[in-house]
Every structure is written in structure tokens, then in C-alpha cells.
Image: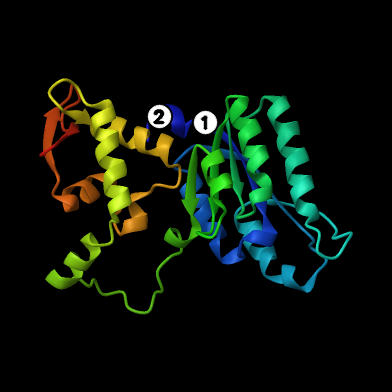
Amino acid sequence: MDENNRERNLAVLIDSDNVSHNYIKVIMEEIARYGTPTIKRIYGDWTTSEAGGWKSVLLENAITPVQQYRYTTGKNATDSAMIIDAMDILYSGRVGGFCLVSSDSDFTRLATRLREAGELVIGIGEEKTPEPFIVACDRFIFLEILQPPKQTDRREIKPSGSAAHKQKNRIPQKTVELIVTSVNDVADEDGWAFLGDVGNMILKKQPSFDSRNYGYDKLTPLIKAMNRFEIDRRDTSNKGIKHVYIRDKK
């Protein structure tokens, strides 16, 4: 993540009806990779018994709860409150991006409108999130890959050969094709493509792409596991920093 992204001010708007309080800590840690969350609000009806688990989490993460009563059974009033606040924040010009935490497709139009205004839009929600909301964002991150592992055994467990092989098989053919075509899209005349440009192209085509969805922390290990590309680490003007270039073997 470059310095400009880390310095970007972000508005984090959370739909409490669509996320558990257990995810908040890892969500905020993930958001920090893309900028500084200067506005942090969560929307819900805090008068209900279900809201009890939120208090300590909100205090620990300095998130402002916004009260929204459920005026009618079956209607989600938090959607309207989030949308109104998002537009107010947009016109204030105080941030350079938004993070919408929800799995609700009702925010699809909001994400589209914010991007039309030139804002970065990051979505975070469950894998069940409807595709229209996912593709309306610049990037969409599934909650399932952010959930911290259970701390039942702190010993390091190295995967066996069969386990590692099974992990490689987790990369579906559709994803392989996405990566291959993205490499070809940004490659030079000799077929070499800078891995950073490849990653950006993949996200433009599929905002929900994340190497962690397939068991890899970064894109480089995933590329290596595919055994499909030549890999060249090139020196840069910064000592100790190399740029990774890849080329399709076929």
C-alpha cells in the first residue's frame, strides 16, 4: 500500500443489522490498510436487547453509534440513515473515500453514486452479499477472510505435502483465467507484467478478488502456487526493494 493511500481520510459507515460486533476489531484493522478512518459511525436501533454486545466494542474502537428506530416491522430504517449521512459527508469534502460495511444490496446505488463523485469505495460484507453491490465498489472484502482464527492452540502447524496440494487446488479455473487475462492486458511487448499493475487490473474486473479467499496472504504466493508464470524480481532505486514481474509460460 503506497503512502498516498495510507494518508487518505476515510468515512467508515457500518450497518449493524448486517454485521456481528465480533468482527469490528478485524474490520478496523483491515480498513487501516487503505487509509485513516476519520469518521466512524454505526447505525442501528440501540434500544433493542440485541444491541447489548456492542457497547464495549464501540468504545474500544471510538465508533459513534447512530440511533435509528425501527418504525415499521420488517423495514430496515438504518439504510436511509446511512445513505443520508454518506451524502452529507460527500458534500462536506472532508474525506477521500468511504468504507461501507454491509451485506445489503440496498447500498448498491449509494456505492455507485460515491464512485461517480470520484470517491474510493470499499465494501465489506459476507460472501452472501449480492453481486450488484460487490461490483459497485472499487474493492469488496469478504468478512469470512477477516475472522481471526480460534486461539485454541498457539503452536505453529506446518501443512503437510497433501495439505499444501489441496490448498493449491482451491484456486478455481475461473480465477486462473481472470489472472491470466489480466497479465496479458498489462504486459509489455515481451510478455512481462509488473505484478502491482496486474493486481490493480484484477480488482477493476473483480472487486471481490483477494488472495486470502484462496488461502494465500499475498498475491505473489498465489502466483507461485499456480506454477503458470515465470517470475522475475528486479532491482529498484531503493536498496533492498525489488519489483516482481511475471510472464505467462504458455
Q: Is residue 72 visible?
A: yes
Rendered image quadrant of residue 242: top left
In the rendered structure, the answer to whether residue 152 lies left or right of residue 167 reads right
Residue 56's tag is none
The residue at which mark 1 appears reads as: 8
Residue closest to the eye, 188 or 91: 188
Residue in the image at 66% along x and 45% along y: 107
Residue in the image at 69% along x and 64% along y: 55
The residue at which mark 2 appears reads as: 3
Rendered image quadrant of residue 166: bottom left
Residue in the image at 78% along x and 46% along y: 80
In the rendered structure, the answer to whether residue 145 lies left or right of residue 189 reads right
Q: What amino acid is labelled 1 in the image?
A: Arg
In three-dimensional space, the C-alpha distance between marks 1 and 2, rounded to whole angstroms, equals 9 Å
**Callout 1 environment at 10 Å: few (<14), some (14 to 19), or many (20+)?**
some
Q: Earlier in the sequence, mark 1 or mark 2?
A: 2
Looking at the picture, how far across and down is residue 127, in whole percent? 50, 59
Q: What amino acid is labelled 2 in the image?
A: Glu
**Callout 2 environment at 10 Å: few (<14), some (14 to 19), or many (20+)?**
few
Residue in the image at 14% along x and 46% along y: 228
| Picture quarter with the N terminus | top left
Residue closest to the eye, 240 or 162: 162
